[in-house]
Amino acid sequence: MSERLRRFASWDTAVILVTVVVLVIASFGVENFGTSRNFTFLLLDLLPIALVALPMTFVIVTGEIDLSVASTLGLTSAVMGSLWDKGMTIESIIPLCIVLGAVLGALNGFFVTVLKLPSLAVTIGTLALYRGLAFVVLGDGAVADFPREYTSWVTGTLGDGPIPNVLVPLIVLALVFGVVLHATPVGRGVFAAGAGEQAARFAGIRTGRVKFWLYVVSGAVAGLAGVLWTLRYSSARADNGFGVELAVVAAVLLGGVSIFGGKGTLPGVLAGVVLLATLQNALRLQDVSNEALNIVTGVLLIVSVLLPNIVSAALRRRRPRAVSPER
Amino acid sequence: MSRRVLTGLLTAGLAVALTACGGTTKNDSSGTGAAQSTATANPGAAAKEGVKMAFLPKQLNNPYSDIEVSGGKAALDELKGVYKLVGPNDASASSQVSYINTLIQQQQNVIGIAANDPNAVCPSLNQARSAGIKIVAFDSDAAKDCRDVFINQATTQGIGEQLVKQANELSGGSGEIAILSATPNATNQNAWIDVAKQTLAKPEYANLKLVKVAYGNDDDQKSFQEAQGLLQSFPNLKVIVAPTTVGIAAAARYVSSSSYKGKVAVTGLGTPNQMRAFVKDGTVKQFALWNPADIGYLAAYAGVALSSGQITGAQGQKFKAGKLGEYTIGASGEIVLGPPTTFDANNIDKFDF
């Protein structure tokens, strides 16, 4: 099998194709799916997941993970509500919240890269820590009276069309992240760090520094997601975004990023996000219960991890003496 | 090299494709802002058949809300409407929003919602209203400007008076009574106790004497000990009134196992399932709680009345709610279910919650 063919048949290409097929089937097969209003709903629902999935792709490609993103989102939301309640202007709160996210991410980065602790343990710890702090900041209450110009921008659409305003920052960020990952030395360093940490270091890549900044960016984007989440629901709460980290990791893995690092593409991840959101939306319109939705997501995730392994094992067996750089 | 450029382009392409998914603009009605109904009510209008009403409780698989929506289903069966139940598995603030969006897409006529967050659901509810869907909040209100009516299970006044009425009946109209509450700063309980004290000040209750308000902190152990303490400090005590489901169960458990059984009455607010044993063994003669099934039942009747144009949600409008009788809409669209249901040995087996 030629190298080119194998690349064409890669998992992320498959996910993109499946996503397109599912979108087409849902548009024609599911009543009320293919309306412009439903696309607005769909895009609004997938926005926070897509946003947080961008830096998460980088983090997982380096072989690490960041499970604290949803708690960072919640803590940012709580702080945003608390500051707004205390009379600070929204124009200063928003940048402050993104900086707060970056600081929370830097703490993760410090533990993982300086103290060399396993990222799974560290970010499970900060998952609990940041969520706990969020409840300390805002308790069970909610702050709701955010300015209408901001909340209606976040829920609104471009020129009253079907495209949400918030899709603009997402596309800009997706382009930046995509170019950095796939067409710059930084991106090559990220892949190298994930494929083999030691080899990457010998090649002169400062993997620790790369990872540290990835956590900072991951936190900052989670902070931005917290701001947008709060404005979308006009409700700052400590429990905002609860459990979102799992949806993000699921979408990233479904999009073909290897949990062991070193492999994956951003288009694949975005397709994974769209695929999961489309399935949820379409199945809900078909009155499929939430429990069944969870089952579908779970099975998809396992398949997405299992299938590429089976395929590559099968390929290896067919050509037992092939010289392959990736063992 | 070319591969990287290709992948970069793919990212861009997919992002653009995402945008293009929306396709051409149809009659998109993403209207925001409170769509206050301008139609006038026609009380004589017939109740429409086939009204599609979806219930969106705080979360699914919660025994309490299961009973609430079962009442809604019963009412819609009577009215020949179409019942539907959807909802999230977690009671978080934002999880209801995608369900509201789905219901808008499915063109329901009425949404009955117990809001997890009065404001988070607001923009979506208003979107639903501009699509012509009526909103009935029940159990837990949404912000006033994004629903048509709210079914309030009970007023503070109603519960406070009910507690005194129970104590009066059980004591035979005179003697010492004590209250076993939740925490000293529990908002609901304190409001009810205030009303109870005002009610006790009325001449017809002059012979009832409230000797103490004890606090069991809604902790089973602490409530048990407080009940014990009350009976030791006040040997002539006739009634313990516990306006909390934890307190009433703990007090009943203590009394049923003590020599006071049959001499001291326990009453207040509790659920039939936790109190059944104590009613059967005679420790508790009666206690009260609103019937959750009636909340859903009334919500469904209000929803069909809204959808049929009999009411618009303005104060003073009246509508009929089947077996519950006629209701009048109060200030800011509130409909009060009525006095709590009293449970005793005769009717307790009809309730399972």
Image: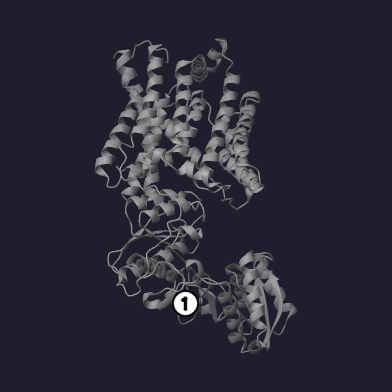
Q: Is residue B164 left or right of residue B21?
A: right
Residue indicated by mark 1? B348
Q: Nearer the viewer, residue B218 or A31?
A: A31
Image height of A222 relative to A286, above or below: above
Give the number of marks. 1
Image height of B234 relative to A174, above or below: below
The answer to whether any part of residue A199 appears in the image is yes
Q: Nearer the viewer, residue B237 or A233?
A: A233
- Residue located at (36% from left, 40% from top): A162
Residue A11 image point, x, y percent:
35, 25
Q: Nearer the viewer, residue B134 or B231?
A: B134
Q: What's the chain of the residue with tag 1?
A: B
Residue A231 image point, x, y percent:
52, 44
Q: Is residue A217 left or right of residue A12?
A: right
Judge the density around disc 1: few (<14), some (14-19), many (≥20) Cα neighbours within 10 Å: some
Q: Name the quadrant containing residue B181.
A: bottom right
| Element type at mark 1 | helix
Of the 4 image quadrants, the one containing the N terminus of chain B is top left
The answer to whether any part of residue A241 appears in the image is no
Q: Name the quadrant containing residue B311.
A: bottom left
Seen as rendered, the residue at the extreme right is: B233
Image height of B329 relative to B174, above or below: above
Residue B81 image point, x, y percent:
30, 65
Q: Nearer the viewer, residue A73 or A248?
A: A73
> Which color scheme does this rendered protein use?
one colour
Residue B348 image point, x, y percent:
47, 77
Amino acid type indicated by mark 1: Ile
- Residue located at (61% from left, 82% from top): B167
